[in-house]
């Protein structure tokens, strides 16, 4: 793995940052946890790439709070020029 940041998907909406920190701490030092409210995913930052790899291999497709979670390397956010379109402006021109 090239990063110590992990994407954790398919979360139960009731899963807390504290719960994720507790679970991931079994595989190394957790630097930070950020649950994206109402979206069912989170980001976990481990202290090292090795810790992140151990956590990914151990926890991917395992049950957490009644859901099989997906754990993968976090990818940098891609800028999408179409996301910030002027749709609302063009809509008002007609």
Image (cartoon, rainbow, N blue to C red):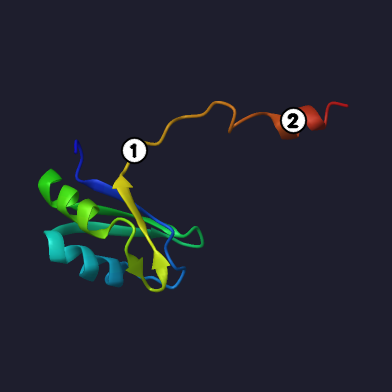
Q: Quadrant of residue 34?
A: bottom left
Total labels drawn? 2
Pointer 2 residue? 89
Q: Secondary structure at mark 1?
A: loop
Q: Secondary structure at mark 2?
A: helix
Location of residue 58 in the rendering, given as x and y in whole percent from the top left corner: 21, 58
Pointer 1 residue? 75
- Quick one: label 1, few (<14), some, or many (20+) residues within 10 Å? few
**Residue, far right:** 94
The residue positioned 39% from the left and 63% from the top of the image is: 68
Q: In the picture provided, is 62 more to the left or to the right than 28?
A: right
In the rendered view, would you say 52 is above or below 13?
A: above
Q: Earlier in the sequence, mark 1 or mark 2?
A: 1
Quarter the N terminus occupies: top left
The residue positioned 74% from the left and 30% from the top of the image is: 89
Judged by depth in the image, the label closer to the viewer, 1 or 2, is 1
Q: Which mark is residue 62?
A: none
Location of residue 35 in the rendering, given as x and y in whole percent from the top left corner: 38, 60
Mark 2 and mark 1 in contact (Cβ < 8 Å)? no
Q: Could you say which is closer to the camera, residue 13 or residue 93?
A: 13
């Amino acid at each position: 793995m090239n990063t110590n940041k992990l994407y954790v998907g398919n979360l139960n909406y009731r899963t807390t940052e504290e719960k994720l920190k507790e679970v991931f701490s079994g595989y190394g030092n957790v630097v930070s946890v950020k649950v994206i409210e109402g979206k069912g995913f989170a980001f976990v930052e481990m202290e090292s790439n090795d810790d992140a790899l151990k956590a990914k291999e151990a926890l991917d497709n395992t049950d957490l709070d009644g859901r099989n979670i997906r754990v993968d390397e976090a990818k940098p956010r891609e800028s999408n020029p179409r996301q910030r379109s002027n749709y609302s402006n063009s809509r008002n021109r007609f």
